[in-house]
Every structure is written in C-alpha cells, then in structure tokens.
Amino acid sequence: MHHHKFNDFPSDFLWGAASAAYQVEGGWNADGKGPSVWDLFTKLPGKTFEGSNGDVAVDHYHRMEEDVALMAEMGLKAYRFSVSWPRIYPTGRGEVNEAGLAFYEKLIDTLLAHKIEPVLTLYHWDLPQALQDEYGGWEDRRIIEDFERYCVTLYQRFAGKVKYWVSLNEQNYNLTNAYQLGTHPPAVQDRKRFFAANHIAFLANARVIKAFRQHVPNGLIGPSFAYSPAYPASCDPKDMLAYENAEEFNNLWWLDAYCFGRYPQAALAYLRENGEAPEILPGDMELLREGTPDYIGVNYYYTLTYTDNPLGGQTLQRINTTGKKGTTPSSGIPGLYKTAPNPHLETSNWDWAIDPTGMRIALRRLSSRYGLPLMITENGLGEFDKLEAGDKVNDEYRIDYLRSHVKACQEAMQDGVELLGYCAWSFTDILSWLNGYQKRYGFVYVDRDEQGGSLRRIKKASFHWYSQVIASQGKQL
Ligand code: BG6
C-alpha cells in the first residue's frame, strides 16, 4: 500500500523520549537506595564493555531539574522513565524508603509543571539484589507478592499524577540475556529455567495489572515488549517454517501470554516434548487472562531474518557489544531457526538492521492480532557520536533514522493502527548496559566516557530536529 496523502498526527499524540533508572540516574547508594543486581553484576570482571557501570551514569539523580528544563526547551510532550525498585524498597520489601519516593515525586511534579506527561515504567531490570540472594529473583513465585507490594506503593503515591504506566520492560530481552545467553544477571544458561522464570514474570505482570485497575482506575498500563518482527530469508518453505518458529518462540510466547493469557501452540508442544515447558499451576492461566494490558508498549529497533537450521546446527550466540561492524555471528536454535543477514537492509555499527518498514509491519501485526492501542516506548539509533568544535554534534544519521521511523508510524496509523505516542530512545545519552558509554542514543550529548568526564549536557543536531517535529505536529519531518 502506497498512500497518497497522510493524515495528521492527532493533537494529543505523545511526542516523547525515554530512559531507564540504571542507565541515567547514578547515585547508586544515595539516600538509602539498596543495591540492585546490576550494581553487583557490573563489578564482576569482563561482564560489560570496559567494565562500565551505572554508579554515576549521567548523574540524572543530581541533575534532574537541568534535564527536565532541556525537555521543556525541546517541547517534549511525554517522558518515559523507570523507577528503581531498590530506591523504594532497599531490600525489595519491608520499610518504604521515603527519600526514594520523594525523588520520583519531584521528577513527576517537575514534568507536570512543564506540561510533560510522565510515562512511568515499574521495572527496567534493576531487581533488588536482596531478592536475588534470598530466593533467586524471578525464579521464585515469592517475587509476585513482593513486586505487587512495590507496584501498589507507587500506584497509591502517584495515581493522581501519572496516567501512563509500563509494567515490565522487555521481559523477553532481559530474561533471554539473564537465563539463556548468560549476559545479564544472574548470568544463567539454562532453557528450562528461562521458561520457568518467564512464566513467573507473566504471573507477576498480570497481578500488578489487576491491582492497577483498583488503584489507578483512570490510568493505562501495559508491558513494553522488545519486538523484532521475524522475516523469512526466502520463500523456500523451510525458511518460512523457520520464520514461523522464530515468531512463536521469540515474540508470540510473550505477546500471546500478555494479551491472550495463553501460550502459542507449536512452541508449547515443542517445550513439553523437551521437558522444558514451565510448570503451570491451577489458576495461573486464569490470572493471566484477568491481567491483560490496556495497550502494548513497543520497543522497536530492528527486524530479524531467519533461515532453516537443522539439528546439530547453529546455537545461540552473544550480541555485538563493541561497535565493530560485521562481527555479529548467526544465532539460532538447532532444529528451529537461525538468523541470517538481510541483504536489503543497511546496518548500524552494532549490526542492527535499519528497517523503518519493519516498524510499520510490527505495528500492524500487533494491532491486528491483539486489537489494542500501541505506544512506541522505545525507538532509536545507538551510534558513535563526535563532539566537535563549538559544542556541535552533527548526528545526521540519527535524524535520518528517526525521521524514517516517525514516517513509518504515520503510515501505520494510516493503516488503522491506534498509536498513542512515540518515545524515542533516549533523551540524554545513557549507559548502554553491555556497550558502555560509547554507544550513544540521546538528543542530548553527555560529556563522559567509560572513565568519566565533566557530565556537561550538549544539544545535538537531532535535538533541534525533534523539537521542530514536535512543534509542527509531525508535519515538518
Ligand atoms: C532496550 C532497552 O533493550 O534497548 C534499553 O530497554 C536499551 O534499556 C536499548 O538501552 C538499546 O539497547 P543497547 O543494548 O544498545 O543499549
């Protein structure tokens, strides 16, 4: 479908930008905060790029007002941020740490004073270390109660101020790294444990959505999902089957569980046959169906292309964390699928395919399968940026990326998708979990590298571009 004319973006469209607590805040032990699993994991040798960690990050904890002033100057309509669970409950439960709540309250109030809609993420991977130590975090059903108590604390405090909420950020990506690749804490490589932890996370997600209905009746809540739509490498039926397998195992496993309260059939049959299916107790699937979301948050960066992978073939491989282009190996599950390069697409220096049409496809697939509104909760380009003389950062490549993806949103809306907003990743530069500070995403450059820096904020070319996009309601791209 090629459209002749575009509809305008609706006047209440949420033009936003996003961040996550561990990636921006710093202040890792400030004002009573307890340690998260990331505070410990990043200190283990060899886990992150050049041993980078979020102890200071971009010091947003101490520069919140300056950062929000920049958002206001840009004209931002929405800001997505995450709350750090161990700031609120330093050991995961027990006594509330009032200073932690006060920080987020101040952030929310400052945003509202500038007419910026807060989009609050309840969990962006920084689990209290105490809960990991006590019962293995997401591997134990006790986390459901603890997570609910933490979320209800935030609902009660912020119900009147925050309308848009995100439950779990990228459960799929985070737990794949944590329990299959061994690249996020607790660095396990075990498929049975992976599916068990995911099942418990689905239950926790449903429980906090159920509780949300009581405490924030006028709000909207949904998970944000790392959606890399699958493509077949060719029309060879073997590749088509590999693509079907990949879509079920890598996407529908989460999306169907969240939105339909069930698991996709072929994937579930395969796991049962292999003894890797999660333990489903009476009442579990009912709970999932009672806790479905109001909207789906979509974190879209790239599509993945799949081809046949016979038994004995390619296994799961780690991602490129260096920015050395062309170093990402094919990754797969023998007997199901493996990734293949897409010859039609350019890639970033981290080998991520640049595919705005893929975003349109992503939005259409989700909207048509689940019939829910969508919000782009993340989309952006991680690249090396260069600070040039006169405090200039000419990130034209990022502008190109964002422009083509905003256009894809417009096309998807024309195709009938209900899209609430678009949150670019990220507002300021951030710590990229495994890629250090050299993989930059922000509209605002932060003067620091793996060793440190002045932390000065510098507006990039993309800052001015996005500002004009917002001011023109998407007419001036
Ligand atoms: C998502 C996360 O995986 O993508 C973000 O929600 C992350 O926290 C972003 O930073 C980009 O990934 P990366 O690995 O390039 O930082």
Image (cartoon, helix red, strand yellow):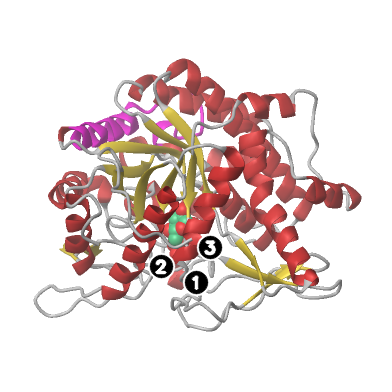
* Mark 3: secondary structure: loop
Where on the picture, by quarter, is residue 155?
top left
The residue labelled by disc 2 is 436
Alpha-carbon span between mark 2 and mark 3:
15 Å
Q: Residue at x 23, y 65 (%)?
A: 462
Left or right: residue 326 versus residue 424 is right
Q: Residue at x 26, y 73 (%)?
A: 395
Decide: is 363 above or below 45. Answer: above
Compare marks 2 and 1 and give the one earlier in the sequence. Answer: 1
Where on the picture, by quarter, is residue 157?
top left
Left or right: residue 361 versus residue 435 is right
- Residue 211 sits inside the magenta stretch: no
Q: Specify the segment rendered in magenta.
A: 87-112
Q: Quadrant of ligand 1?
A: bottom left
Give neighbour class at mark 1: few <14, some 14-19, many 20+ (Cα, 10 Å): many
Q: Amino acid at mark 1?
A: Trp
Magenta span main SS: helix
Q: Residue at x 18, y 56 (%)?
A: 467
Compare marks 2 and 3 and give the one earlier in the sequence. Answer: 3
Q: Is mark 1 within 8 Å of ligand 1?
A: yes
Alpha-carbon span between mark 3 and mark 1:
27 Å
Q: Amino acid at mark 2?
A: Gly
The residue labelled by disc 3 is 44
Question: Which residue sits furthest right?
Answer: 273
Q: Amino acid at mark 3?
A: Leu
- Mark in front: 2 vs 1: 1
Q: Which mark is residue 225?
A: none
The residue labelled by disc 1 is 352
Left or right: residue 199 versus residue 386 is right
Asked whether the beta carbons under mark 2 and mark 1 sit within 8 Å of each other, the answer is: no
Q: Is mark 3 within 8 Å of ligand 1?
A: no
Q: Position of residue 54 (x, y in %)?
A: 38, 56
